[in-house]
Image (cartoon, rainbow, N blue to C red):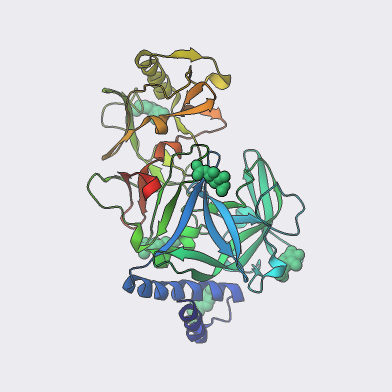
Amino acid sequence: MVSLLISYIVILSPFYNSSQTRFDHMYNAFSRSVSRANRMSLESKSSFQSNIIAGDGEYLMKISLGTPAIEVLGVVDTGSDVVWTQCEPCENCYKQNLPLFDPQQSSTYRNLSCKSYTCKALETLSGCTDQDTCQYSIPYGSGSSNGDLGVETLTIGSTSGHLVTIPRIVFGCGHNNIGKFGEAGSRLIGLGRGSLSLISQLNQSIYGKFSYCLVPNTENSNATSKINFGSNAMVSSNGVVSTPLVAKEDPNPSFYYLTLEGISIGSKKFAYNASSKAGTTEEGNIFIDSGTTLTYIPPELYEDLVSALEKAIDAERVSFPGGILCYKSKDDIDVPIITAHFAGADLKLQSFNTFRSVDDDVVCFNMMPVGSNGVNFPIFGNMAQINFLVGYDLKAKKVSFMPTDCTKH
Ligand SMILES: *[C@@H]1O[C@H](CO)[C@@H](O)[C@H](O)[C@H]1NC(C)=O
Ligand SMILES: *[C@@H]1O[C@H](CO)[C@@H](O)[C@H](O)[C@H]1NC(C)=O
Ligand SMILES: *[C@@H]1O[C@H](CO)[C@@H](O)[C@H](O)[C@H]1NC(C)=O
Ligand SMILES: *[C@@H]1O[C@H](CO)[C@@H](O)[C@H](O)[C@H]1NC(C)=O
Ligand SMILES: *[C@@H]1O[C@H](CO)[C@@H](O)[C@H](O)[C@H]1NC(C)=O
């Protein structure tokens, strides 16, 4: 497949449009070559696949960048767009266990030109150096990543077991990264809706489909699971439920918005918005994010859930910073089933979705009111998604969930 990809680029080169920059040309050739490659992979019933490893409240997936290929472990993040990794030379880098990516050591690395369509289309995050290198700056709550936008060869696994090489993926080579990030990862794989995300860059070849399964995030567990892109990412089986994907500009067009109608504690249902009339839930009132640990819901709904949980849970409540609902318990406490009612899809959440142990003998609720931790819009976070096979179908505009033992998936 690798040699085929390269030969298609050669075959396509007569279509070179001289008014475009070199990298735009490569970028286009790449899209066409990948859609061509995908026809092949369909024949061989193969699609891109990688392993997911649970970190500290985050999930990391393995890809490789460059020639020779250097392993990158990036946070699986449906809540952002850019793929970026820490790069040499490093002005500021946080500690990471894997070696830093060094563009000087890769024969396939190219800086993205400021004249490129890709750079021009991203004015909000790009500047330009004297040498015409497109620059990005991504702010985070606790810091930022800044560096060059580069174009590189990406290597990823496939369902056939072979490594697949995808030329000309645009990524952020971070030379100045400030903030608190886990040491296990070398940073972020943006899977959002925006044009620079891995999903958008692979779009033609994966038919707008990807799926992941997140294992329980317990210490001392080395369980891995899979993320699939393309034909193998279909979630269809008994027990699968689906909810419409809503496209929205605010607060960010990159997010995958869903419609949450309410949440039940046991058999008692609470509406997302108690003051709205029944059946008038606003569409796209929450987004689903694999890169955020907790779930954030409107404060009124949060208050409703907390009082219902206090009645239902027979354990000693302990005070915890930030007003989080926590109980004293050495073992798992007995919690009622909490059901998230998305439009057309009820998700029964188990105790590992809704409570986590934060200390030797303290367990805390995994939901928080919007407004806490600087979060200003409802988010369906990654702990709530544990042990569901979650499938995104951007063409059919829906997200599907199937209860699954992700350690076996
Ligand atoms: C060449 O690229 C320019 C700029 O992207 C575009 O306006 C033009 O239509 C292209 N020409 C052809 C023949 O594709
Ligand atoms: C990429 O651009 C940066 C900043 O302009 C420059 O320091 C670096 O040498 C360039 N790298 C390559 C491979 O051209
Ligand atoms: C991705 O593919 C879908 C279906 O083929 C298409 O409707 C959509 O416009 C594409 N998106 C991008 C960003 O290319
Ligand atoms: C997980 O992996 C580490 C390092 O390879 C090993 O020391 C540990 O025993 C493993 N834990 C389990 C539960 O398999
Ligand atoms: C709740 O519904 C009311 C009435 O429909 C509306 O004015 C308000 O903005 C809604 N609040 C939220 C958080 O959706």
Quarter occupied by residue 113:
bottom right
Q: Is residue 203 left or right of residue 320?
A: left
| The one of 273 and 324 positioned closer to us in this rendering | 324
Residue closest to the eye, 212 or 378: 212
Q: Position of residue 53 (x, y in %)?
A: 50, 48
The answer to whether 64 is drawn above or below residue 177 in the figure is below
* Residue 172 position by quadrant: bottom right
The residue shown at (42%, 53%) is 226
Does residue 298 appear left or right of residue 17 in this picture? left
Q: Split into 4 quadrants, where in the image is the N terminus?
A: bottom left
Residue 131, image x, y percentages: 75, 68
Answer yes or no: is residue 67 visible: yes
Indicate left or right for 128 with 303 as reference. Answer: right
Let me know if residue 252 appears in the view: no
Q: Where is residue 386 drawn, in percent x and y?
A: 41, 40
Name the one closer to the observer, 218 or 63.
218
User: Measured along the vertical axis of the image, is residue 81 above or below residue 156?
Assistant: above
How many badges with numbers are in the image? 0
**Which residue is situated farthest in the left direction here?**
238
Residue at image coords 35%, 47%: 389
Q: Quadrant of ligand 2?
A: bottom right
Looking at the image, which is closer to me, 246 or 173?
Answer: 173
**Image position, residue 159 (x, y; %):** 39, 64
Q: Is residue 186 above or below residue 339?
A: below
Q: Quadrant of residue 279?
A: top left
